[in-house]
Amino acid sequence: MTNGQLFDHIKNTLKNAGKEDADFDAKCIFEDIVGLDMLNLALHRSDEADGVKAENAMKLAEKRAEGYPLQYLLGKWEFYGLNFKVGEGVLIPRPDTETLVDTVVNHFAAKKFYDPQIIDLCSGTGCIAVSLQKTMPKSKLIAVELSSDAMPYLVENIRSNNADVKILKGDVMDGRLLDNFKDEESEGDYRQLDCIVSNPPYLTAEEMSDLQTEVTFEPASALDGGNDGLKFYRVISCLWKEILKDGGLLAFEIGYRQGEDVAEILRKGGYTDVKIIKDLGGNDRVVTGIKQG
Ligand SMILES: C[S@@+](CC[C@H](N)C(=O)[O-])C[C@H]1O[C@@H](n2cnc3c(N)ncnc32)[C@H](O)[C@@H]1O
């Protein structure tokens, strides 16, 4: 089989399975396994393909045709211009989440505040924490994650991106985790940070029961936001307020229909200057609020 025949076989496998992005997926699989980009494929179309690589590439194409996520097949994905290791057990970073990172970066840039202390709750791959830390090199980041399956990805992504991010393993819904921020000198007081950022699980029970095939391969614990999808917003905005400075920023990613509900949770929770921010597709994607001083 030649390189050209192999590429066409991969593409047709995906097209026949009705994959919308068959061309793009075929290109990613071919480049990753065979090691030829599209220019080199054009130059070497009639060369004989390596037998083992061809077999591997065809296997991946078949898995992809069954709906297995491309990102898990490749084992890596780009977010905010950085590379992140991904695989079963951890949520794949989404382009929409870049709006959340932009929002936090712009907030501190506008204040010319270059070394904020930020905590990223529900960190997963660490895409938010690592991107913030690399964009604001003087910032200090803490990444909180509960899942033992996600943890190796978080550790590896911080290491491979050489980011100054500390990890705290634990349950963001459990107030005992805040003991880690007790100020040793003043009994009962908490260390205060400049920003809480979070992309928590936010799908409703109804959405959980009707997931796109690709998403069913991702961990349910990264998606399930309780019956109405809002339970993490209610708990985080209340519980973690203790460690946010007066005037500090709370920034959440939200589902595109949750803007008003989350904004209301923040207003009722005593946050001011509550804003709903849209993603590049024009959907509500981020809600921010300021802890009242
Ligand atoms: C929507 S994903 C976001 C992951 C990552 N921040 C991102 O933007 O791609 C939510 C993450 O929260 C984690 N998680 C779920 N429940 C948690 C809890 N109670 N405490 C801490 N992390 C939790 C999941 O394991 C998952 O990694």
Image (spheres, grey):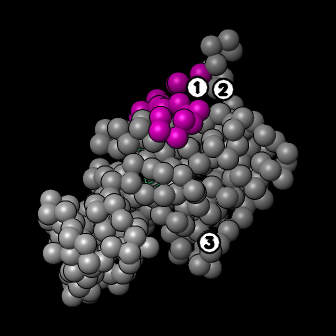
Name the residue rendered at 59%, 68% in the picture. Answer: 285
Left or right placement of residue 138 versus residue 113 in this view:
left
Q: Quadrant of the C terminus?
A: top right
**Residue 141 place in picture, x, y as percent:** 60, 36
Please report contact status of discs 1 and 2: CB closer than 8 Å, yes or no.
yes
Residue designated by label 3: 279
Secondary-structure class at tag 1: helix
Residue 201 vs 68, above or below: the answer is above
Q: Which of disc 2 and disc 1 is earlier in sequence?
A: 1
**Separation of marks 2 and 3 at Cα, in angstroms:** 32 Å
Residue designated by label 2: 191
**Residue 178 place in picture, x, y as percent:** 53, 30
Residue 243 vs 262, above or below: the answer is above
Which stretch appears magenta?
Answer: 159-182
> Which amino acid type corresponds to the residue marked 3 in the rendered image?
Asp
Name the residue rendered at 84%, 53% in the picture. Answer: 110
Name the residue rendered at 25%, 72% in the picture. Answer: 47
In this rendered view, identify the residue nearer to me: 227 or 96.
Answer: 96
**Separation of marks 3 and 1 at Cα, in angstroms:** 33 Å
